[in-house]
Amino acid sequence: MNRRITVVENILSANDQLAQENRARLDAVRLLGLNIMASPGAGKTSLIEQTVRRLAGQLRIGVIEGDIATSLDAERAQAAGAASVQINTGGNCHLEAQMVRDALNQLSLDDLDLLIVENVGNLICPSGWQLGTHISVLLASVTEGDDKPYKYPTMYRGVDVLLINKVDLLPYIQFDMDYFRRGVEILNPGVTTFVLSCRTGEGLEAWLDWVLQSVQQFRQADR
Amino acid sequence: MHELSITENLLELALKHARSAGANRITDLHLVIGQLSSFVDDSIQFYWDAISQGTIAEGARLHFRRTRAECLCHSCGQRAELTPDFTCPYCGSPALQVLTGDEFYLESIEVDFPPIPESEET
């Protein structure tokens, strides 16, 4: 006898379940988690370095670095003053909730005010996997071209915050900011956006203020 | 690359539902995948054939229902499929809002059950 069984369940629901458990662990110690996603070379590690350095003395920051190989990024984050853990995905193109769970075990969560997860550099894969972090941040850079929202709609749709990096290079390249932002607006109306350069520091203050404010709001919120 | 991981999750999900229904064979899986989801049918099928071997889902057929990325035009009020340049195909306006296309779920599975043994006379 053949019978049809209705399922209607997200294909990655097992990962979602683990992500919920990660979230509960962070909530229990009132630790805000950011998931930073971007293509390779957009400046994720530079952003994290700058954020850790400039907020030193105000926030104790933990960093989980996801990479296919090497621990270079974790070393950079550590040198900037963060407690860092490296995850090598061994070829996997994105982080999964279970990898973050293992990394959380290596951090002293009680002693942190902010957790930053740097996802593997990739504009496709990370978007499908929830990690348990509270806020998804996409770091775009103007050198990638202004057509990226049109080509990678899934990534642009699912994020809460968009950073546009390397704007100090705008005079030297062809990048139509209006075209870029129009694509973003259609996919993700009203997404919180910061335009900055991690190299020159232009626009960083607004981002840092937002981080501080978000941590504060998160701590005060009932959960 | 990520299709392997997706396919492993798909197999686990299907097996879980088949087991809890008491089925002994999965014959078909019906998937709904939105146009804005970045997953490749052929790639999922390729991994499926490999990893379903030796399970009760071996040889099961995968059916993909692709849903369109539909948007609403705030200028002319029409609903239309999202075009590559994100403008309304009716009036050319860029004032669009995406409504559908993110779907990514297992809708249903078709399963066989073991034959019910005839009760023995005492």
Image: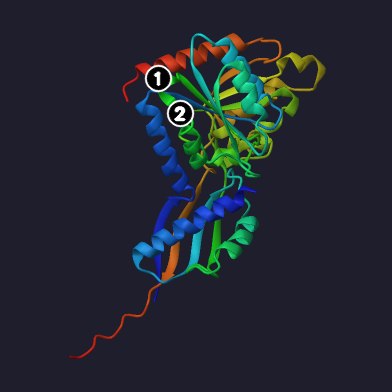
Q: Residue at x 40, y 16 (%)?
A: A217
Q: Is residue B13 left or right of residue B61?
A: left
Q: Residue at x 54, y 64 (%)?
A: B52
Read off the residue under disc 2: A134
Placement of the N terminus of chain A among the 4 image quadrants: bottom left
Relative depth, front residue between A102 and A94: A102
Q: Which mark is residue A218?
A: 1
Q: Is residue B85 left or right of residue A138?
A: right
Quadrant position of residue B107: bottom left
Residue B96 visible (yes or no): no
Q: Position of residue A56 (x, y in %)?
A: 54, 11
Mark 1 neighbour density, 10 Å: few (under 14) some (14–19) many (20 or more) = some
Labels 2 and 1: the sequence-earlier one? 2
Q: Which mark is residue A177?
A: none
Total marks drawn? 2
Mark 2 neighbour density, 10 Å: few (under 14) some (14–19) many (20 or more) = some
- Secondary structure beneath label 1: helix
